[in-house]
Image (cartoon, rainbow, N blue to C red):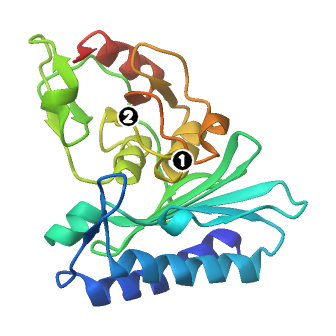
Amino acid sequence: MGEAQAIREALVQAGVTAMEHFRHVTPRWKESRSYVTEADLAVQASLVAWLRARYPRDGIIAEEDGCRVKPQGSGRVWTLDPIDGTASFVAGLPLWGLGLGMMVGAQARAGYFYIPMTGDFYACVPGVGVRRNGQKAGLKDPAPLHRESVLLSISRTHQAVHVHDAYPGKIRSLGSTIGHMCFVATGSADAALLGRVWIWDLLPGWALLKAAGGVLKYLHGPRVDLSALRDGSRAKGLMLCGHPEAVRRYEKLLRAA
């Protein structure tokens, strides 16, 4: 069985655990001012156990409870976001998922995202490329922006950026950072504006975007260096991702508030 298929089965099984809690959870606040639920903790526990059994020499950086496992000579580190889009999960909305990424050094090598409510599975495996439900996918062609162009964005776009009146398209916030990046990487949106998130929010989607030829950079700044986030630090500012030409076009229309 290939690695992608094994990971899909692990994520699907963990998704069953998440669905057992869906629409009847009581969240609590973390120090980061974001939600955590019993579903996050249960999914993380099962997937960390699975990773440690299958890849005993690899490292793990998981979102909840400061979970860190140092690599034992393999050089590979997995990042785990047990439920990306916890606020949507708590609200009973459908866009949330389970994200798993793998890096060597500062380089994204593989990324996986599973959305239980739709059954969609996004994957990027070295040498294979970007897949959505097993089918090859890629970035949208960078056509000039128009009425149906789509920028996926953080929920507080109105507080974070000023959007130039000349922008003819749409802005949508669907609730999941990894989901936004996967949708861009597979051609469902032109670009995505991301907030000051953590490495577990970025690595799975960045692996897909990178394989598709996309970029991930700070808004009006340099490209994002994942090695600076491996210690648990948040990204230092707003980020844009997408086809290089689409990112250039959106940077001309967005200004940090």
Q: Residues within 10 Å of mark 2 (few under 14, many from 20)?
A: some
Which three-letter amino acid code belongs to the residue tagged 2?
Answer: Lys
Where, by quadrant of the figure, is residue 116 drawn? Answer: bottom left
State which mark lies toward you, 2 or 1: 1
Displayed quadrant of residue 167? top left
Q: Which mark is residue 140?
A: 2
Quadrant of the rendering where the C terminus is positioned: top left
Q: Residue at x 29, y 71 (%)?
A: 118
Amino acid marked by disc 1? Ile
x and y percent of residue 30 in the render?
Answer: 35, 61
In-image side of 5 versus 115 (left or right): right
For the point 49% across and 48% down, the residue is 205
- Residue 52 versus residue 185: which sits nearer the camera? 52
Asked whether 243 or 177 is in front, the reply is: 177
Q: Position of residue 201 (x, y in %)?
A: 46, 51
- Classify mark 1: residues with Cα within 10 Å, few (<14), some (14-19) or many (20+): many
